[in-house]
Image: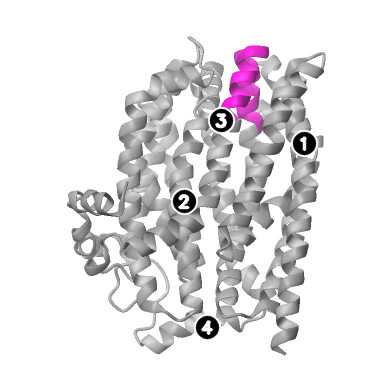
Amino acid sequence: MGSCGAKNAARRVGFLPLLPYLCQQFSPVLGAGGQQIPSDVQDEKEKFLVLGEKPVGRLLFQYALPAIVAMAASSVYNIIDGIFIGQGVGPAAIMGLALTMPVMSLTGAFGAMVGVGGSTLMSVRLGQKDYEAANRILGNVLVMNVVMGLSLQLVLQLMLRPVLRFFGASDVTIGPAYDFMTVILVGNVVTHLYLGLNALLRSTNRPEKAMHATIGTVVVNCLLAPLFIFVLGWGIRGAAAATVTAQLLMLLWQIRLFSRKDDLIRIQRKHLHLDPKIVRQSLAIGLSPFLINLCACFVTVLMTRSLAAYGGDYSVGSYGIANRLLMLVVLVVIGLNQGMQPIAGYNYGAQKFDRVIEVLRWALIFGTAITTLGFLVAMFWAEPCATLFASDSPELIAMSAHAMRILSLTFPVVGLCIVATAFFQSLGKPGTAIFLSLTRQLIFIVPALLVLPRLLADPVEGVWWSYPVSDALAFLLAAVMLWRQVRDFKLKTETKS
């Protein structure tokens, strides 16, 4: 919508001006939640200055470790949730759950556009010591998440059954998929706000709080899911309800953290409206992760439709299991990226290019190590991992293990691809990041998905092999783009000296 329409939509969200007040009301219940933040503004500013002064290796460890732990915990929950559903509801539910991945990618695309865009812009403004702009960004991220979350929820709820059918749902799998997504969409605004504020916690030098929020969500989820699924008998709806409830509780805590009057960056009523300039800048930067997730949605739809056509429900289910397990590796690297982005963004804003190069070097080393470890696990322990989801279905176990091995063949080089896209996002260069993400997820993988199943004797094998082929091509392109950017930074550093 246009800027005027967006402002009117924001004004209709009547509870937004009450956020600071509500946070004060929740504060006695939620507690202090961590270390005391200095009341002196100068001390508060010192928190951000360390991003440009502290040794980069230590900074990356400090920022990335909480994010990695948080993302790993979140992925482990997704695995545990799948185990609960598989063991408590049955194989049909696991196969139906695989069909919800495109919808989740679609909602995640819009959330990432606001969260990543706003947090990257926040890091750059903090590097420029523009604290008033940083506060305006915080208010805009809140409003954008509410408007976007509500709009997306309404549209998808009205179209859910036809959408799931289009994604490849059969008469067996559409019931569980519909039940799960109906509950998830009810909490769509909560999810958007929770993820957006977590990204801003990292940008405002509080990565440990972002970790606490994610781990808190995982703990509450793991407590509520078996209660809702097994004790109350809610089935797959119970798993979704546990997810939304956990995110709501952590969202209230996050809002309280951003409402403390002695914070330099905090929620202020005067900033709870849409600023067209901030909206444009945030969405421009966030366009890259939006397109990444949108392409992931498109590719997942193509995958599920192809697998449903060539191999049936079991092939779709095996993709769901393999994807859930391999996403643990990908999310750990994304956690590493979340630690890298505030450091790279701040130093880029401060024109300390040597430090930007150094944080990239460390991120590439750690990212490659993580994906290589994932490759080894997939090669040697695929069957035991798949058994956790479908212990009473040998056919589904065998198909899932086979899929894991093929999909992870190029994992040792995938780390560089993931880091490269996030690195260009952190520099506020959405065009380059978009180019890298589109080539891998659209230009490379889509033709492979369309051609390879027709070339190989077993079409399902062609679907699996499309992933490593596209990843290998994406690695070559990302390596060239990074080399050119690092060369440019080195020339600028030499010029300054």
The answer to whether residue 127 is visible is yes
Q: Quadrant of the C terminus?
A: bottom right
> Which of the marked residues, 1 or 2, is nearer the chain's N terminus?
2
Task: Tell me the amino acid under the disc marked 4.
Answer: Leu
Circles 1, 3 touching at the beta carbon (< 8 Å): no
- Disc 4 to disc 3, C-alpha distance: 44 Å
Circles 4, 3 touching at the beta carbon (< 8 Å): no
> Which of the marked residues, 2 or 4, is nearer the chain's N terminus?
4
Which is closer to the viewer, label 1 or label 4?
Answer: 1
Task: Tell me the amino acid under the disc marked 3.
Answer: Ile
Q: Is residue 109 left or right of residue 414?
A: left
Residue numbers of the magenta segment = 300-322
Q: Toward the viewer: 256 or 88?
A: 256
Under circle 3, the secondary element is helix
According to the image, label 2 marks what residue?
A: 113
Residue 227 point in image, percent of width and height: 40, 33
Q: Residues within 10 Å of mark 2 (few under 14, many from 20)?
A: many
* Residue for point 64% across, 50% down: 435
* Residue for point 41% across, 18% down: 162
Which is closer to the viewer, label 4 or label 3?
Answer: 4
According to the image, label 3 marks what residue?
A: 83
| Rendering quarter of residue 489 | bottom right
Task: Tell me the amino acid under the disc marked 1.
Answer: Pro
Q: Residues within 10 Å of mark 3 (few under 14, many from 20)?
A: many
The answer to whether residue 311 is visible is no
* Residue for point 54% across, 42% down: 293
According to the image, label 4 marks what residue?
A: 49
